[in-house]
């Protein structure tokens, strides 16, 4: 039996504080309490970008007007969640939080959030695909 594909969109959000780039990671309220950028499943007829923006507002309280989306960065992660009968495909975009003081307001889907340097973000993000994504974002920002 072939596994179904579940599509999602997300934003890797960063801010600059004293010239240091910090990435926003949210800690899930469920299962293994993993850390990821805001992301979520596409709703009917929704684009990857629309889902990414909607989920960021729902999960972190950050609206599109708070962000500057970098349309030159797009990365697709595909993986098989453990003990699930589907393949997940998440398209991530990169977005800058224009005012670093903008508060994050978590939904009940997450229990915590942190703004982290690249190295700390990679330590929190336990999956190699997420660590690689963060490296690629950082490399893109330093071009």
Image: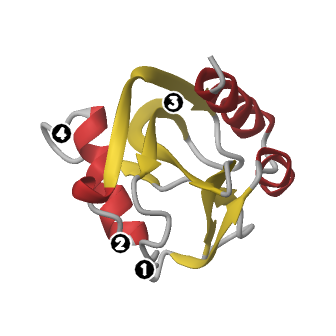
Q: CA distance from mark 4 to mark 3?
A: 22 Å
Q: Position of residue 10 (x, y in %)?
A: 43, 44
Q: Kindly state the secondary structure of the residue where label 1 is placed.
A: loop
At x 12% / y 37%, what residue is drawn? 45
What colour scheme was applied to this rendering of the protein?
A: secondary structure
Q: Which mark is residue 61?
A: 2
Q: Point out the tag, 3 or 2, that comes first from the N-terminus.
A: 3
Task: Answer yes or no: is residue 2 visible.
Answer: no
Q: Point out the tag, 1 or 4, that comes first from the N-terminus.
A: 4
Quadrant of the frame with the C terminus: top right
Q: CA distance from mark 1 to mark 2?
A: 5 Å
At x 22% / y 42%, what residue is drawn? 50
Q: Kindly state the secondary structure of the residue where label 2 is placed.
A: loop
Q: Is residue 139 left or right of residue 127?
A: left
The residue under label 4 is 46
For label 1, the crowd category at 10 Å Cα-Cα, with few meaning under 14, some 14 to 19 and many 20 or more, is: some
For label 3, the crowd category at 10 Å Cα-Cα, with few meaning under 14, some 14 to 19 and many 20 or more, is: few
Asked if disc 4 and disc 2 are in contact, CB closer than 8 Å, the reply is no
Q: Which mark is residue 74?
A: none
Q: Is residue 50 left or right of residue 22?
A: left
Q: Is residue 85 above or below residue 3?
A: below
Q: Quadrant of residue 17?
A: bottom right
Q: CA distance from mark 1 to mark 4?
A: 24 Å
Asked if disc 1 and disc 2 are in contact, CB closer than 8 Å, the reply is yes
Camera-nearest residue between 139 and 108: 139
Camera-nearest residue between 89 and 76: 76
Q: Point out the tag, 1 or 2, that comes first from the N-terminus.
A: 2
Judged from this view, the residue extending furthest toward the left is: 45
Q: Is residue 8 left or right of residue 139?
A: left
Q: Position of residue 128 (x, y in %)?
A: 80, 35
Q: Point out the tag, 3 or 1, that comes first from the N-terminus.
A: 3
The residue under label 1 is 105
């Amino acid at each position: 039996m072939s596994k179904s594909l579940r599509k999602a969109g997300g934003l890797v959000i960063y801010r600059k504080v004293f010239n240091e780039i910090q990435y926003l990671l949210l800690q899930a309220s469920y299962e293994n309490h993993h850390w990821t950028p805001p992301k979520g499943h596409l709703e009917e007829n929704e684009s990857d970008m629309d889902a990414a923006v909607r989920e960021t507002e729902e999960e972190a309280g950050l609206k599109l007007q708070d962000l500057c989306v970098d349309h030159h960065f797009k990365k697709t992660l595909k993986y098989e969640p453990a003990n699930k009968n589907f393949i997940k495909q998440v398209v991530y975009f990169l977005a800058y939080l224009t005012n670093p003081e903008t508060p994050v307001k978590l939904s009940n889907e997450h229990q915590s959030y942190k703004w982290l340097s690249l190295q700390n973000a990679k330590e929190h993000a336990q999956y190699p695909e997420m660590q690689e994504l963060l490296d690629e974002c950082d490399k893109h920002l330093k071009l």
